[in-house]
Image (cartoon, grey):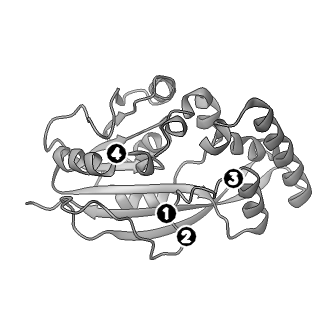
Amino acid sequence: MNPDRARSFGAAADDYDRLRPAPAPEAVRRLLPGPGAAVLDLGAGTGLLTRALTAAGATDVVAVEPDDAMRGVLATRSPGVRVLAGTAEDVPLPDASVDAVLVASAWHWFDPDRASAEVGRVLRPGGVLGLLWTYWDPAQEWVAELRAIGGLDDQGRAPAVDADFVVDLPEGAPFGPGEPQVFRHAVWMAAADVAAMLGTHSAVLTLPADERAEVDRRAREHVARAVGTDPVRVPFVTAVWRAFRTSG
């Protein structure tokens, strides 16, 4: 994990919240045990998943996020949700206090050994660990080229879009076998916002200012040339992985 990249999102918290897509509703329903379940959104960012959970009917949601700027946007946009400062390695909740721990586009930033232990601690036996990644669908050629402009695939952070992708938890983590599933969906966006969304990724956020400006210029030119419409129908993938906490 690159600490600078992991801490880069706060500088763009408002744009992140405005431009990044929420997960596919079907993906959220796949991971939500039920409307009355106690759910922890861990590494919640600005609350994109938090709001998707409440939209899906969840009534007992707590969001934990370490970055002050991201957490501030989350609290403003998600009234009624308990919002706490904390990390995946030190979750500020009691033992066996939630029915599901969901992590949207953040698991790769965690220390897997410590995070797995903490998630196992706060989950009740039989509870759900659900990991989600929502990202531009690289199966579309123009999207793959846009991702390449921002260097988004250089780190290989997102799971493959094939339905059999694997998440490896540390040996001894208290979870049963994982179950992957992939959901495709599309969102209409202004052409300028499609290009600007590239700038909310850590690969771009951590570039020097002149290089970020060059990425933005190239992205705007590419969208205008390759798509040529405004608004743009942008294809996304939400990949989910679900495992259940064992009783041992």
Find residue 166 and report its horizontal and vertical position in percent.
Answer: 40, 70
Q: Label 2's element? A: loop
Residue that label 2 marks: 161
Q: Is residue 16 left or right of residue 234?
A: left
Q: Residue at x 53, y 35 (%)?
A: 4
Name the N-terminal-most of marks 1 and 3.
3
Between marks 1 and 3 in the image, the one whose residue lies nearer the viewer: 3
Q: Which mark is residue 58?
A: 4
Between marks 3 and 4 in the image, the one whose residue lies nearer the viewer: 3
Q: Label 4's element? A: loop
Name the N-terminal-most of marks 3 and 4.
4
Between marks 4 and 1 in the image, the one whose residue lies nearer the viewer: 1
Q: Residue at x 34, y 70 (%)?
A: 179
Q: CA distance from mark 2 to mark 3?
A: 18 Å
In this rendering, does residue 165 appear at all?
Answer: yes
Between marks 2 and 4 in the image, the one whose residue lies nearer the viewer: 2
Residue that label 3 marks: 151
Q: CA distance from mark 1 to mark 3?
A: 20 Å
In this rendering, does residue 56 appear at all?
Answer: no
Name the N-terminal-most of marks 2 and 3.
3
Q: Label 3's element? A: loop
Between marks 2 and 3 in the image, the one whose residue lies nearer the viewer: 3
Question: Mark 2–mark 1 contact, CB under 8 Å?
Answer: yes
